[in-house]
Image: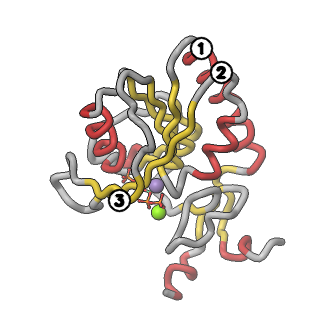
Amino acid sequence: MKNLDQDIKSVVVSKERIEEICQTLGERITKDYRDKDLICIGLLKGCSFFMTDLLKYVDTHLEIEYMDVSSYHGSTESTGEVKINLDLSRSIEGKDLLIVEDIVETGTTLNSIIDLLTYRKAKSIEIVTLLDKPNRRKIPMTPKYIGETIPDEFVVGYGLDYNENYRNMDYIGLLKEEVYKKS
Ligand code: PRP
Ligand code: MN
Ligand code: MG
């Protein structure tokens, strides 16, 4: 057993299943974006593991960009309310964008980003997410590419954190309650 495994109650998405998801979604994206001007935009930091594994299965020309935004969770007026910590390094006008997320919960983060990228004249914007928690949604939104739909439970690993920890696990798991209570 690995050190970090001791804080995990159960496996939600195994390493093998993640690999399978990356391959399936990668092949779909390859088909859909052949002949397009694709830029993949990863949202840091959660996207980091999924982004690299997924894009190895996308067999078409693309550019890689990253953004880091903090949305104001809990705020009722979410639209446009986003703090940009790291912005794109190029113009995206007229480009086909694929936003890469580890998880979609309330939809607040993506809603703000989509507003911003629409304002900057993207040609098209789609979302690929490893995990979707539709039960938590506050802003209606359906990502085009979803790895797994999961219930509203606190998961960590493979990019997802609890207090910035556990991102470096190679699978996604449920955190034990006693770990929350410690802090
Ligand atoms: C998490 C996650 C998504 C977002 C989903 O990021 O990675 O980006 O929250 O939540 P939402 O749908 O309710 O907006 P977080 O802001 O924790 O930053 P991180 O990626 O650096 O962990
Ligand atoms: Mn994130
Ligand atoms: Mg986080």
Which residue is found at the position 34% from the left and 46% from the top?
107
Which comes before the other along the chain, label 3 or label 2? 2
**Disc 3 and disc 1: Cα gap in Å?**
32 Å
Q: Position of residue 160 (x, y in %)?
A: 56, 59
Residue furthest front as drawn: 90
Q: Position of residue 16 (x, y in %)?
A: 78, 45
Q: Nearer the viewer, mark 3 or mark 2?
A: 2
Residue topped by disc 1:
34
Which residue is found at the position 56% from the left and 16% from the top?
32
Disc 2 marks a residue whose amino acid type is Thr
Which comes before the other along the chain, label 3 or label 1? 1
Disc 3 marks a residue whose amino acid type is Ser
Which residue is found at the position 66% from the left and 70% from the top?
8
Quadrant where the N terminus is found in the figure: bottom right
Front-most of residues 151 and 33: 33
Residue furthest bottom as drawn: 182
Residue topped by disc 2:
60
Residue topped by disc 3:
70
Which comes before the other along the chain, label 2 or label 1? 1
Decide: few, some or many residues near mark 1? Use Cα within 10 Å; few <14, some 14-19, many ≥20: some
Which residue is found at the position 74% from the left and 41% from the top?
19
Front-most of residues 109 and 151: 109
Q: Is residue 38 left or right of residue 6?
A: left
Helix, strand or loop status at disc 3: strand
